[in-house]
Amino acid sequence: MSSTLFSKIASGEILADILYQDAEVVAFRDVSPQAPVHFLVIPRQPIPTLNAVQPEEATLLGKLFLVAAQVAAQEGIAESGYRTVVNCNAAAGQTVFHLHLHVLGGRPLNWPPG
C-alpha cells in the first residue's frame, strides 16, 4: 500500500493534534470537523478499507473502538453520547484509503446520517 496522509500522521511525518497514541493506534482531531468534537482513530498498520481487514486483525479492530471510547471520555462526550463511523470505499465517502474510525459528538446527531 502506498503511503497515505494518515500513515504520515501515524509516523510523525505530518503533524496533527494527537489525542492518543501507542504502538498500534493513533487518535487525532479531524482537520475538517463535522461536529464540535470530531476525531479519527486509525491503526498504525496500513489497511486500505474495511474490506481488506483480515481475521487476524480482529483484535486491532476492537482496540480502535476501545481507544474511541477512551478518547470520547477524555473529550467529555462519553456520557452525552457520540457516533462512530467507518466509511468503506468512495461511494460511502471514504477519501483517505487508510482504515479510520470517525468519532463525532458534542451536539445532537440526526438519523439517518447520510
Image (cartoon, helix red, strand yellow):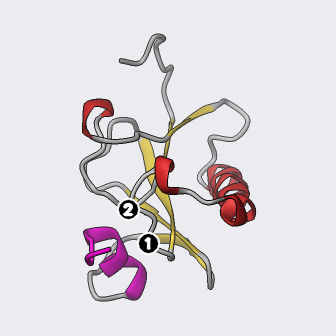
Q: Nearer the viewer, residue 72 or 67?
A: 67
Q: Nearer the viewer, residue 108 or 63?
A: 63
Horizontally, residue 73 falls left or right of residue 85, namely: right
Position of the N terminus, as image quadrant, is: bottom left
Q: Is residue 101 visible?
A: no
What kind of residue is marked 2?
Answer: His
Query: Is residue 90 depicted above or below 7 in this figure?
Result: above
The part of the chain drawn in magenta is: 1-11
**Residue 107 lies within the magenta run:** no
- Label 1 crowd bin: few (<14), some (14–19), many (20+), radius 10 Å: some
For image coordinates 33% across by 36% down, the residue present is 34
- Label 2 crowd bin: few (<14), some (14–19), many (20+), radius 10 Å: many
For image coordinates 49% across by 49% down, the residue present is 50
Q: Find numbered disc 1 in the image and state the secondary structure of the residue it sits on.
A: loop
Residue tagged by mark 1?
A: 46
**Residue 8 lies within the magenta run:** yes
Q: Nearer the viewer, residue 78 or 4?
A: 4
Residue 37, percent from left and from top: 46, 44
Query: Is residue 47 depicted above or below 112 in this figure?
Result: below
Residue tagged by mark 2?
A: 98
Q: Find numbered disc 2 in the image and state the secondary structure of the residue it sits on.
A: loop
Q: Is residue 20 visible?
A: yes
Position of the C terminus, as image quadrant, is: top left
Query: Is residue 114 depicted above or below 35 in this figure?
Result: above
For image coordinates 46% across by 13% down, the residue present is 110
What's the magenta bit mostly, secondary-structure-wise? helix
The reply to whether the C-beta atoms of the residues labelled 1 and 2 are less than 8 Å apart is: yes
Horizontally, residue 112 falls left or right of residue 70, namely: left
Indicate which disc, 1 or 2, sits on the residue closer to the N terminus. Answer: 1
What kind of residue is marked 1?
Answer: Pro
Residue 99, percent from left and from top: 44, 57
Spatial CA span between label 1 and label 2: 6 Å
